[in-house]
Structures are given as C-alpha cells and as structure tokens.
Image: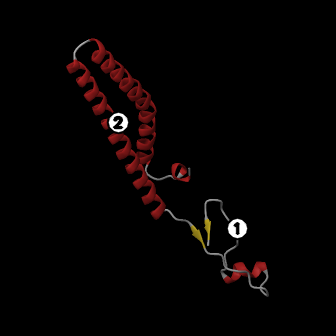
Amino acid sequence: LQWLRNPGPHHEKRTLCGDMVCFLFITPLATISGWLCLRGAVDHLRFSSRLEAVGLIALTVALFTIYLFWTLVSFRYHCRLYNEWRRTNQRVILLIPQAANVPTNQQSLLGLPSLKRNSKETIV
C-alpha cells in the first residue's frame, strides 16, 4: 500500500489499476466463454460433426492460452516494478543511543538527531 501512496510515477499506478480492472472483467468473460465453447463441443460431438467440435476445443485452448499468457506477463511486469521500487525506495533510520551523561537539550546542540519515528521508516 505504501507503493500506491508514494508520489512516484503515476504511469505505473495507472497501469496497475488498468490491469486490475481488465483482470476483473476478463476473468469471468474467459471462464464463461470457455465453458460455452466446451458445452458446444460436447453437443457437436453427440449430435453433429466432429470437425466443429474440434474447432470449438481449439478455440477454447487458444482462449485460455492467451488469457494465461496475459495474466503471467502482467503479473511479472508488476512484480518487477514492485521489486525495483523496493530496491530504490528504502527508508532507514540509524538510532544513536542516548549518552547517559548528556541531557536531551544538549543533544540537539551536539547534532544528535531526536529519536522521533515515522511509521514509514525502518528502524535498524
């Protein structure tokens, strides 16, 4: 979720949202189309020509092959973008232990950072 909130390139976010919308529409359509093609192939095998049944089976295989190919390529693309973002957008804070004899108000004078933590930062 932090990746989506990051003010980075909006093109990548639009691509992710577009792919998610396409996935949500194409998945049920591909499932219904494949089921209808297979039902038609079964009916053609029972009552009419085998050539039409083979054509419908080939259409089903092509449909699911294209769907799986698109899904895998899209998933791989977004995983690569996410891994690249993780590699280049690391936020790390180095905590320096407070000195026992140095008061807190003198730490700022010595250049020691305060120990405030932001929820987006990683503590090391």
Sequence-first tag of 2 and 1: 2
Q: Which residue reaches farthest bottom?
A: 101
Q: Residue 108's spot in the image, x, y percent?
A: 70, 78
Q: Which residue reaches farthest front?
A: 46
121 vs 38: above or below = below
Secondary structure found at label 2? helix
Query: Which residue is depicted at the point 40% across and 55% down?
Result: 80
| Side of 66 relative to 124 (left or right) | left
| Side of 116 relative to 70 (left or right) | right
| Side of 101 relative to 92 (left or right) | right
| Side of 17 relative to 97 (left or right) | left
- Name the residue beneath numbered marker 1: 116
Query: Which residue is depicted at the point 35% across and 39% down?
Result: 68
| Residue 119: quarter of image | bottom right
Query: Which residue is depicted at the point 42% across and 47% down?
Result: 12
Query: Which residue is depicted at the point 79% across and 88% down?
Result: 101
The residues bearing labels 2 and 1 have C-alpha atoms spaced at a distance of 49 Å
122 vs 1: above or below = below
Nearer the observer, 19 or 111 = 19
Nearer the observer, 51 or 61 = 51
Q: Residue 85's spot in the image, x, y percent?
A: 45, 58
16 vs 114: above or below = above
User: Cβ–Cβ below 8 Å for labels 2 and 1?
Assistant: no
73 vs 21: above or below = below
- Name the residue beneath numbered marker 2: 67
**How many badges with numbers are in the image?**
2
Secondary structure found at label 1? loop
The kind of residue tagged 2 is: Tyr
Nearer the observer, 55 or 11 = 55
Q: Which residue reaches farthest top?
A: 47
